[in-house]
Image: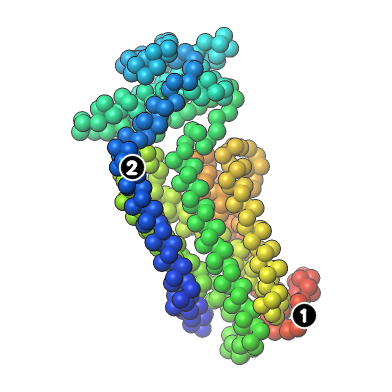
Amino acid sequence: MISTIIKREFFALLKSKVHIISTAILCGLFLIAGVIGKIYFDKQGGVDEMALNIAKSYINAPVGDIGLSPELAELETVITTLNPAAKILTSPSQKDAAEEWLTAQGKDGSALATLVGNLENPVIIQYGDSNEANATSELIKAALKENAYQKLGAVEPQQLAILQGADQVVIHSVEGTISLVLENPAGYFSGYVTIILLLFAIMVGISSVMQGVVEEKSSRVVEILLSSVRPRTLLFGKIIGIGSFVVFQMTLYIVSVITALKISGLLDSFVLNAVNFPSLIGASFLWMILGFFVFATFGGALASTISRQEDLGGISGLITFFAIIPFYLAMFLVPNSPDGIVTKIVSYIPGFSSFLIPIRQSLATITTWEICIAIALNLIGLALLTLVSGKIYHNSVLQTGKRIPLLQALRGIK
C-alpha cells in the first residue's frame, strides 16, 4: 500500500503545472547565466586569463619580505618581476622548521610569508592576518599562477601538476587566523551555492508535505484513506513520495548548473580545479535527503494538528524559521570559526548537519570520521523523530475543528 501512496504523491507533483513551469524557468536561468558568463569571459581573454589578471591586481599593495625554500628558488625572478619592491629570503624546506623561522622573522617585522613544498603541492605559511600579510600571500599566489601559465604550452604530466598546484595552494597561519573565504574562494562559493539549492529543495518539499496533509484532512479524504492504511504509513508514504520528487527536481538543477559551468568555461578552468564535484554532488544529495526527512517529518506531524489552510501559515513559518537558522550558521559561522567547538557541536545536530556539513566539506575543514558520526546521529535522531511524529499524526489527523495543542497531540507518549 505504501508504494501506491509514494507513486501517487510523486506523479501528482510531476504533473503539476506550477512545478513544471517553475523548474523549467529556474533551469533556463542557469543556462542563460552560463551563456552570459561565456560572453563575459571571452571578452576578458578566457576564465584562466581573467583569474590571473585578478591575482596580479593585488600585487601593488605593500608587502613584507618573502621566504622561499631552496626547492622553489626559481620563483624569485617571477616574484620580483611582479613586485620589484619584494625582498626574497631563504627559508627552511621543512614545514615545521619554516614555521619557526617565520615566527622569528615576523616578530622582528621582517618576513610575513614563506613558501614551502614544491610546485605541485605548494604551501604558503603566513605570519598574522594583517592587510600587509594578506597582500604578501596574494603576491606569492600570483607568482605561482604566473609561473604556471608560463608553462601552459607544456603537455608533460609534471607541468599539468604544476598548473593544478598553483590553483590549489594551501595557506597556513602561524599567528592570527585567515578567513577561509579568502583562502579557498572556490570552495566557499561552491558550498554556498550548494546550501542555497538545499534550502530551496527542502522548503519546496516540506511545503508540499504540509499542504497535502491539511488538504486531505480538511476535505475528509484522509478518513477514507485511513480505512485501508495505517496513519503512520500514510504520512511516511507521502513524505517518501514527495521526497522522491525533490531528489528528481534537485537532479535537474544540478545538471543545469554543471551545464552552465561547462558553457561558461568555468568547469574546464583551473579556477574550479580545486572543487571535487563528484564528492560535492554526492554530499549534496545525502544531506538534502536527511535534511528533508527531518524537516518534513516534523512539519507533517505539526500540519496534522490543524484543519484549515488558513492556519497553515503559522506552522510553515515556524518550520521555515528552523531551516533558516542552520542556513545562516553555515554561511557565517563556518567560514569564521571552522574548527570552533560550537561549529563542531552544531554540525552534529539533525537538521543543522544538512547545511553545515556540505560547506565544511567544501572548505576541507572536516574529517571523514566526523562526517560518519554526523550521519549516524542524524539517522538516530530521525528514527526518534519518526516515532514522535507518527504518534502526533495518529492522534491528530482525524480531529477536526480548532487547532490541537501540541501537548494534547502528544498524549499517549510515555
Return the residue found at the far front. 43
- Foreground of the two, 171 or 346: 171
**Residue type, label 1:** Lys
Residue 147 quadrant: top left
Residue in view at x 42 percent, y 49 percent: 279
What's the residue type where badge 2 is placed? Answer: Phe
Say which residue label 1 marks: 402
Name the residue at 36% across, 23% down.
143
Q: Is residue 118 left or right of residue 219?
A: left
Assess disc 2: are there few (<14), some (14-19) or many (≥20) residues with their C-alpha within 10 Å of its C-alpha: some
- Of residues 140 and 241, the one nearer the viewer is 140
> How does the figure colour the protein chain or chains?
rainbow
- Rendering coords of residue 21 (x, y %): 44, 70
Q: Position of residue 208 (x, y in %)?
A: 56, 72
Element assignment for label 2: helix
| Comparing labels 1 and 2, the label whose residue is closer to the camera | 2
Q: Is residue 239 left or right of residue 274?
A: right
**Mark 2 — residue?**
41
Is residue 161 placed above or below 226 in the rendered structure? above
Q: Give the residue displayed 25% in from the left and 31% down from the top.
A: 152
Q: Is residue 41 visible?
A: yes
Q: Residues within 10 Å of mark 1 (few under 14, many from 20)?
A: few
- In the visual, does 304 lie left or right of 137? right
* Residue 50 percent coordinates (x, y): 35, 35
x, y percentage for residue 233?
58, 78
Q: Is residue 72 visible?
A: no
Q: Mark 1 or mark 2: name the one nearer the start of the chain.
A: 2
